């Protein structure tokens, strides 16, 4: 009998400990679930988007692609298009006139792989017409030429013809890259270019950029 009275507290203590462990496990599982469902924090480049002036899009009066001269020649006699092809392609070879004659290009907008340079389009991240209606209408032709041939900012991408035609002169409120994995990069580059040239964004454009920036990793 004495041994039974001594073992009862031990058994009770073990049961209490087991209940505590179960409660802790449930709490921890719920904690993980609530953390996983919480919205991600704002991407680090959100202030860059906030720095852009939000204003209605301007008219297209007087616009022409000819007001943005393409393609400018560089110091090595290669024009802007050929320079982009060489920088963004793999295994690119060129002839004596600086034309790409072979290579492989992967369009970041849709993942299409292209092996014929003639079938590669060079896209302006901020379309020329979009630049016009957000500030470029007041620039000189020389300033527009610099914008259209900008190799310093992330403005030019080698892409598939289908993606480029689909995009046209649409802003992010009207068109986003089919490859959603590229949304973060696309939005960051778009904001970078607009900020560099002090171009405005309309409200729908701003909100679409914020949506894409929300896909950026922490």
Image: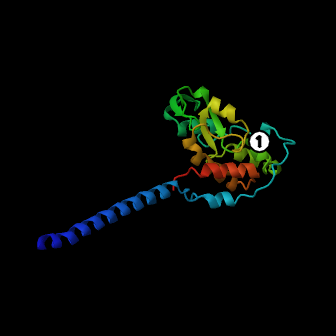
Camera-side residue of 83 and 210: 210
Which corner quadrant holds the N terminus? Answer: bottom left
Q: Is residue 200 above or below residue 89?
A: below
Q: Is residue 172 above or below residue 114?
A: below
Q: Position of residue 78 (x, y in %)?
A: 60, 37
Q: In this image, 86 relative to 156: left or right? A: left
Determine if residue 107 is in view. yes
Q: Position of residue 201 (x, y in %)?
A: 74, 52
Q: Position of residue 28 (x, y in %)?
A: 40, 60
Q: Is residue 91 above or below residue 186?
A: above
Question: What residue is shown at x 60% (from left), y 52% (from top)?
Answer: 213
Camera-side residue of 99 and 88: 88
Q: Which residue occupies the extreme front position in the image?
A: 1
Q: In this image, 111 relative to 19: left or right? A: right
Q: Which residue occupies the extreme right position in the image?
A: 61
Q: Position of residue 109 (x, y in %)?
A: 59, 37
Q: How many marks?
A: 1
Question: What residue is shown at x 29% (from left), y 63% (from top)?
Answer: 18
Question: What residue is shown at x 75% (from left), y 58% (from top)?
Answer: 53
Question: What residue is shown at x 15% (from left), y 69% (from top)?
Answer: 4
Residue topped by disc 1: 129
Q: In this image, 13 relative to 150: left or right? A: left
Q: In this image, 90 relative to 84: left or right? A: left
SS category of the residue bearing label 1: helix
Camera-side residue of 98 and 205: 205
Camera-side residue of 210 and 163: 210
């Amino acid at each position: 009998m004495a041994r039974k009275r001594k073992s009862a507290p031990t058994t009770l203590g073990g049961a209490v400990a087991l209940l505590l462990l179960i409660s802790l496990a449930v709490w921890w599982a719920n904690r993980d679930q609530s953390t996983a469902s919480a919205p991600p924090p704002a991407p680090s480049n959100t202030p860059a988007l906030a720095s852009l002036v939000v204003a209605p899009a301007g008219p297209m009066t007087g616009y022409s692609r000819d007001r943005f001269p393409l393609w400018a020649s560089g110091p090595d006699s290669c024009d802007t298009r050929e320079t982009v092809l060489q920088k963004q392609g793999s295994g690119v070879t060129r002839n004596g006139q600086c034309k790409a004659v072979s290579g492989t290009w992967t369009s970041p907008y849709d993942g299409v792989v292209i092996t014929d340079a003639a079938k590669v389009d060079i896209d302006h991240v901020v379309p020329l017409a979009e630049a016009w209606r957000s500030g470029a209408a007041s620039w000189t032709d020389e300033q527009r030429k610099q914008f259209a041939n900008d190799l310093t900012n992330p403005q030019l991408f080698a892409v598939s013809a289908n993606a480029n035609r689909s995009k046209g002169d649409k802003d992010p409120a009207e068109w986003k890259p089919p490859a959603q994995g590229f949304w973060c990069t696309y939005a960051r580059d778009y904001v970078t270019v607009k900020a560099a040239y002090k171009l405005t964004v309309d409200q729908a454009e701003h909100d679409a950029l914020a949506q894409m920036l929300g896909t950026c990793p922490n």
